[in-house]
Image (spheres, helix red, strand yellow):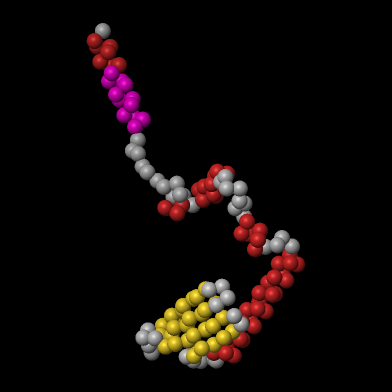
Amino acid sequence: MPRVVKCFILLILFASSAFATELVFTFVNPAFGGYYYNATWLLNSAQLQDDTGESSSSYASSYYSGSSLEDFEESINRQILSRLSSKLVTQIFGEEDLEPGHYEIGDFQIDVTPSDNGIRVEINDPVNGGETVIELPYYGD
């Protein structure tokens, strides 16, 4: 009897070692080096768990109206406004460098002053109380 038990124990030990494998950790999220096809699955599972009630495509639906004609009209309007603003900036500040001074455009007050590192542009909106400061650095030749 003890011989049968020893054989059984040896058989179990050898059989279990044949099925043992090395444990290897891999990331699931592709942002951390995981398999890149997991991105769609992760996004879908996150959207299913979203209980805020907001649509995940709310930005896309607000950006695109859904009608091709309305999208085309918005695109034309953006292009026209972009060209007008660039011509206005060129007309006020010139082609070359920004000239130091105080400018008022609509509700905005713009102060251009030289600083140690470059040109400092302060844009103030007294109506809303907002202020933006932009530093344009000098680049040596």
Spot the residue most to the top: 1
Q: Can residue 138 be seen in this view?
A: no
Q: Judge whether 121 appears above or below 70 on screen.
A: below
Q: Judge whether 7 appears above or below 106 on screen.
A: above
The magenta stretch spans residue 70? no
Q: Nearer the viewer, residue 104 or 9?
A: 104
Q: Is residue 104 visible?
A: yes
Q: What percent of the width, then of the height, locates residue 22?
A: 33, 38
The total number of labels drawn is 0
Q: What percent of the width, then of the height, locates residue 114?
A: 42, 88
Q: Nearer the viewer, residue 8 or 135?
A: 135
The magenta stretch spans which residues? 9-20
Spot the residue most to the right: 69
Residue at screen point 61% across, 48% down: 53
Left/right placement of residue 42 relative to residue 139 reads right
Q: Which of 74 and 37 is in front in this view?
A: 74
Left/right placement of residue 15 relative to residue 88 reads left
Q: In which quarter of the image is residue 91?
A: bottom right
Residue at screen point 75% across, 67% down: 69
Q: What percent of the width, then of the height, locates residue 141?
A: 38, 89
Q: Judge whether 70 appears above or below 137 on screen.
A: above
